[in-house]
Amino acid sequence: MVVLNQMACFFDFVYNQLLVKSKIQDHHSLPLICSSFLPPVEPTSSLCSISLFSPGLRLWLFTTTSDDFPWACLHVTAVAMNLCEENRPPEEERRLRANDREYNEKFQYAHNRIKTSKYNVVTFLPVNLFEQFQRVANAYFLFLLILQLIPQISSLSWFTTIVPLVLVLTITAVKDASDDLFRHRSDNQVNNRQSQVLINSKVQKEKWMNVRVGDIIKMEDNQFVAADLLLLSSSEPHGLCYIETAELDGETNLKARQALPITSELGDNIGLLAQFNGDIVCEPPNNKLDRFAGSLHWNGDSLPLDNESMLLRGCILRNTDWCFGLVLFAGPDTKLMQNSGRTKFKRTSIDRLMNTLVLWIFGFLVCMGSILGLGNAVWESITGYYFQVYMPWEKSVDSAVFSGFLTFWSYIIILNTVVPISLYVSVEVIRLGHSYFINWDRKMYYAKRDTPAEARTTTLNEELGQIEYIFSDKTGTLTQNIMTFNKCSINCRIYGEVFDVNGHKIESNEKLVPVDFSTNLLADAGFLFYDYSLLEVVRRGDRSVHEFFRVLSLCHTVMIEDKAKGELQYQAQSPDEGALVTAARNFGFVFQSRTPETISVQELGETCTYRLLAILDFNNYRKRMSVIVRNAEGKLKLYCKGADSVIFERLHPCCQHMMNITGDHLSEFATEGLRTLCLATRDLDDEMVSEWLLRLRKVGMVLEGREAELAAVYNEIEQDMILLGATAIEDKLQEAVPETIAKLAMANIKLWVLTGDKQETAVNIGYSCNMLTDDMSEVFVVSGSSAQDVREELRHAKQRILGCGKGTGNGFLYTATKDLVKDPGMMTSMLGALGGGRIRDRDQWSQPGSRTGGRLGAGFSGGGMSLQGCDLLQSDAATEGPGGGAGEDLQESSDPGHRGWCKRCQHDKDIPHRCWHQRAGGYAGGAGQ
Ligand SMILES: Nc1ncnc2c1ncn2[C@@H]1O[C@H](COP(=O)(O)OP(=O)(O)OP(=O)(O)O)[C@@H](O)[C@H]1O
Ligand SMILES: [Mg+2]
């Protein structure tokens, strides 16, 4: 039975390969195709049938005859009763019940065992050979070998080919086997990890692979999460727990997750947990790490579930003594596994070149063989005939054509050495050698962390020297991701700037004396601010300043860390929010605690508790977040913070004047490379909020398209707001970033950076990290909001550059929502028209009915050197209008001191652009002048 199973495994493999090769999407159609080109088989007694259940539960039914060549008579007559997991009809929604294995078993959800290995003992040889003969070189050797086995044409002995072929196959097989052994070991190690599962009202030790969907498992601090879980309860107050998601998304800051209040009451009471029999309806398995939609039905109550209460496989539990979770997805269905596709075989450009060369040489060989074969046929028919009398043949060969045909194949064998097939082997050996040189390179050794360079794959080394583009994130990659509250604009006044006695602005530095916050016992000693006037206005009781800090202390997702006794410590998922809440704390608005229903803030010494009615969370499409709270006087308020582009268009018309001034302040902050956010508020009335909350709850239960519907509901209430001000946060560049980028530029490597920052901020960071330089006389901003506009703008820009007689740089980056990249072919040709470029889809989440549509920002230089572009998101004033007009809007609106759009150059107005050579300060005097 074991052998049959192993055979079934192999057939599964071949079946999948056929699927891949034939690009058949529908798994059901393949069996039909197989049987259509194989001769039909009568079920006679000379046939025997083997039916095999492969581990994936696919039923393979073969009928074989006892003919001499077994492969030739293997008929797939009835294949695949599509029971196999991957052939299961796609799940539309997942239903499960906690603590009810029998019920959940009905749905045949995947178990928690994972398998990343490719072979087992029986399948290794056939599968590995099948893979190896897909390589051109090996297939070529095999072809030669077969030719040499035919005595009529063989001129060399067969072992001259078989020896090198077997050698190459064996070496590769040993390497593959050892790689797979490693995968087996790691699979085993993971599958056998221990977890604590609640079975029969007892917490029992179980291996990870035995965990089932619907089980409740207990996790402890610093443990890996075994499967995708719904958090039920935890040791922390209000069902909170902290996780590190570094293995999933590379982010090392802790994230908080919170259980639903009704389940967090279960605590660690095993009796209650064992009785918990909530029904879950949720989305089917998918690879979206930041999204989850489902609902819990328990005790007649229905509650929406989202990503906030999910613990994904691969996360590590931190700062939480224990927590209980309900398994929703296990093994291959977990988001981690759904994201790890099959490793693709990557080819380098040298590989491709070699393949082309070898094909040409092979063509040349065929030509030579044909000419020689033809010559032989002619010679045979004219002259050779006479020579046959000298041959010891009983019967003369009278067909010149046949003789020519045999001669053709003989020459293919004799001249086979012209095809440099050994080149492949030599290149492999050279690569192996290179990878050792990389590992030993002392210049690539980073002593501080004892980290040498490591060539993880031996197949791509030479690509290192041929890199043309580097794609990078900004925050945390180029910058330190350490945010400091630097300046703010409240009620049309900037705070945070320091002037000397002559009234000149001075940069904040260590020599300045920071504001003394010591009277505030809860102040954070690490917070530095140099402008005394702000503290004075707070003390004076300026209402708008108070409201400004109130927003900062209420509108965020920061958590309090309880660990440090007596000391207030914040746990911020977003470092920007951490900086803002700390600033509010030092200015006397100390965020003290939060529960799912309340937020407590100590406002200038007095504790105020706000009832939290809703959090309208942030995402990078909304670019804002809000909270709706009821204050101690019973008034309902909405507090919102977000990007100026989204806040400004949602303000009440009465804020027009303040909006203009704050807009100028924001431009000023952004030209200093600071990250900006706007703050706004709105008074709400009870009736409106209760009606809105009802709708919110209804939308919360929707499984499909929930995000879009939520965004629409959020948007309804985030209108007619009153502007309070803006904040400016600094995120310094990491050490040696400008030098590194300058060196990359010297190597003609184009850098693309992705950022969600305001355009001016992005450009300034671009300058400060040497991505944009003064040599680049112009930076083009492409602001079209449809593919058509963008194409037009790019064409104009190209014409301008070529018209100036300058070379076109071809590295640029833009962001686009999905609706814009629907037509990748068009995009590619559009980018191709400019000499190269790639597309990157920034917003993972497409928004049906998106108002602004996709955004594209592209920059390229007309300078002699290569171009480095950056993602330049337009303010909405720019994106709302059609491409060209948008530029004009900005041109009119912000041009103080030539920092905004330049009118003086009289450039073609169709192309929004900025003349950086006219910038005030450090960037002036570029070559473009
Ligand atoms: N926590 C937040 N609350 C409200 N608005 C925010 C928050 N974080 C960011 N924003 C706004 O949304 C915009 C887009 O944010 P997004 O997270 O996509 O970019 P980003 O991460 O700030 O960019 P980068 O990766 O370059 O730092 C930001 O420019 C900012 O204006
Ligand atoms: Mg961000």
Image: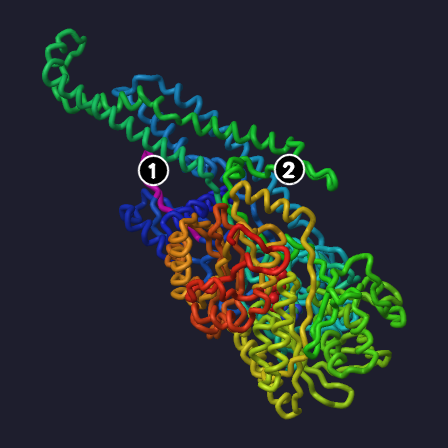
**Alpha-carbon neighbours of circle 2 within 10 Å: few (<14), some, or many (≥20)?**
some
Q: Against 648, is 799 above or below? A: above
Q: Left or right: 285 with respect to 559?
A: left
Q: Left or right: 398 with respect to 55?
A: left
The residue that mark 2 highlights is: 453
Q: Against 917, is 642 above or below? A: below
Which x, y percent locates residue 176? 53, 36
Q: Is mark 1 on a helix, strand or loop?
A: loop
What residue is shown at x 63% (from left), y 45% (from top)? 739
CA distance for labels 2 and 1: 58 Å
Q: Left or right: 133 with respect to 272?
A: left
User: Which residue occupies the foreground of this view, 143 or 454?
Assistant: 454
* Residue found farthest to the bottom: 687
Frontmost of labels 2 and 1 is 2
Q: Can residue 825 be seen in this view?
A: yes
Q: Mark 1 vs ligand 1: CB under 8 Å?
A: no
- Tell how many labels: 2
Task: Please report whichever mark, 2 or 1, sits nearer to the chain's N-terminal start.
Answer: 1
What residue is shown at x 83% (from left), y 64% (from top)? 514
The residue that mark 1 highlights is: 66
Which x, y percent locates residue 847? 50, 71
Which residues are the magenta region? Answer: 59-74
Q: Mark 2 vs ligand 1: CB under 8 Å?
A: no
Which x, y percent locates residue 541? 81, 82
Find residue 487 and report its image quarter: bottom right
Q: Is residue 578 visible?
A: no
Which x, y percent locates residue 365? 29, 26
* Residue found farthest to the top: 390
Q: What element carries label 2?
A: loop
Question: What type is the residue that disc 1 sits on?
Answer: Ser
2 and 1 marks in contact (CB < 8 Å): no
Quadrant of the image where one finds ligand 1? bottom right
